[in-house]
Image (cartoon, rainbow, N blue to C red):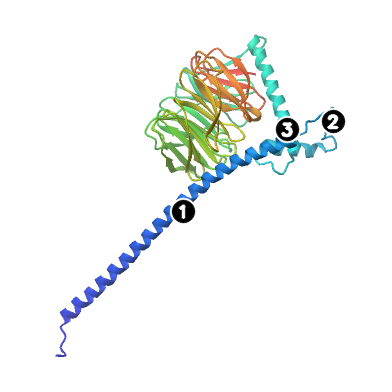
Amino acid sequence: ARFHSPMAASVGGHAHSSSAQAESVAAIKARIAQIRTRTAQVEAEIEQRQSERVQLRGTLADAEAALGAAVHTPVTGGVDPTEWLPNELLLLIFAHLTFARSSAAVCRRWQVLFQELKVNRASMIRRRWREHNSGTKNLIHLRGHTNGVRAIAIGHGNKLYSASQDMTIRVWSMEDGRCIQVLTGHTAYVLGLAVGLDGTLFSSSSDTTLKAWSGVDGSHIETLRGHEAAVRSVVVTRGTVVFSGSRDTTIKAWKRGLTSSTCIRTLVGHAGGVNALALNPDHNTLYSGSDDTTVRVWSVRDGIHLRTLVHTTQVRSVVAGDNDLVFSGVVGADNTIQVWRASDGRLLHTHGHHTDTVLCLVRGVDGTVLSGGGRADKTVQMWCGQTGKHLGAVNLNGRADAIAMAPKGDLYVGERDCNSVTVLP
């Protein structure tokens, strides 16, 4: 009776082991399910907080604008309230207002004074444009491309970059207008350009790639692959992230490394090709304009979709102004520029100064916004980036496919019809 079969003991032990293993697996699966549920809850909470933050920023901007209007006292009688300040301190304050987005540490009186200074600079540019329109000041043409110019960017060291349908990028000296280098490597139209804080140049192309080039000597650094159709636009944050928008309807975020870049996420949601990308002044919000008639608003940090600005026709161009404003240029019979408030998606203004498609929108000097019109329009228009108010226009010889403005106010226009860059000094 005390005899035990070794086989029976083995079977019993195996059954006990299998039962324990099953219980362990079940416990792990239950834990994974809990973690996934909590992860989904946290992601939903983050998205909700992001949306609340955007709404609060809009509310705060409205409140600050109301306070500014309530307490603003204009400078009168020729009295200069800054005459007691040393020049060095005065320059530091102006530098803070120019380059620091958050100027809460500077009194509102200084904000008003500096805004007046920026308006004066815009007025100076308008006077120069009137001289061009009257024929008293001639245009300068930078020639060398053998096909239409599609993108322009201001580089470091007085360099200007132009991208063309001839598959090249030309590097120009802004001092004397000489072409100092030609960058080759793309195998189709070059459609977009962007320059990073370190001077690195990024180009996007119909060959479905992005390329990075040295801002020092123009040498090719790397090629980024991943899109399945033409890459129409590219922007670079102040950090190490590059965004590319493609005709394949996606936006890709690339993380720059010491030796190479990696795609860290793909933003999906557009139902048509992505034509334009823009970053807000803080570089924490990305805007994308698409053939699906929308502008989508995204968080730069985590790629969360925050809001959709719905248009009635294709969006060809987009740029961020100040005070939470977004400017969009559309294709269609109205050829309008629409001004939105990003925080709540409200359409504030619709401007109809162009007589053809708005091909491009960029930031000018001192917070202005510039827009370029199509073949039947042949103008560049200037807008106040703080209010959306129209400031002026200059006439061209052809369509304006690309625009860039140098810090001193010189305007560079890429003309597809003329295969050249037009300069308005």
At label 2, the amino acid type is: Val
What secondary structure is found at the residue carrying circle 2? Answer: loop
Q: Residue farthest to the top?
A: 135
Q: Nearer the viewer, mark 3 or mark 1?
A: 1
Circle 3 residue:
114
Q: CA distance from mark 3 to mark 1?
A: 43 Å
Q: Nearer the viewer, residue 63 or 221?
A: 63
Q: Nearer the viewer, residue 399 or 320?
A: 320
Q: Quadrant of the rendered structure where residue 3 is? A: bottom left
What secondary structure is found at the residue carrying circle 3? Answer: helix
What secondary structure is found at the residue carrying circle 1? Answer: helix
At label 3, the amino acid type is: Phe
How many numbered dots are placed on residues in this image?
3
Q: Residue at x 41, y 36 (%)?
A: 250
Q: Quarter of the image containing the N terminus?
A: bottom left
At label 1, the amino acid type is: Val
x, y percentage for residue 323? 62, 35
Circle 1 residue:
42
Q: Nearer the viewer, mark 2 or mark 3?
A: 2
What label sits on residue 79 in the rendered view? Answer: 2
Q: Is residue 219 visible?
A: no
Q: Quadrant of the rendered structure where residue 87 is? A: top right
Q: Earlier in the sequence, mark 3 or mark 1?
A: 1
Q: Residue at x 75, y 34 (%)?
A: 72
Q: Earlier in the sequence, mark 2 or mark 3?
A: 2
Q: CA distance from mark 1 to mark 2?
A: 56 Å
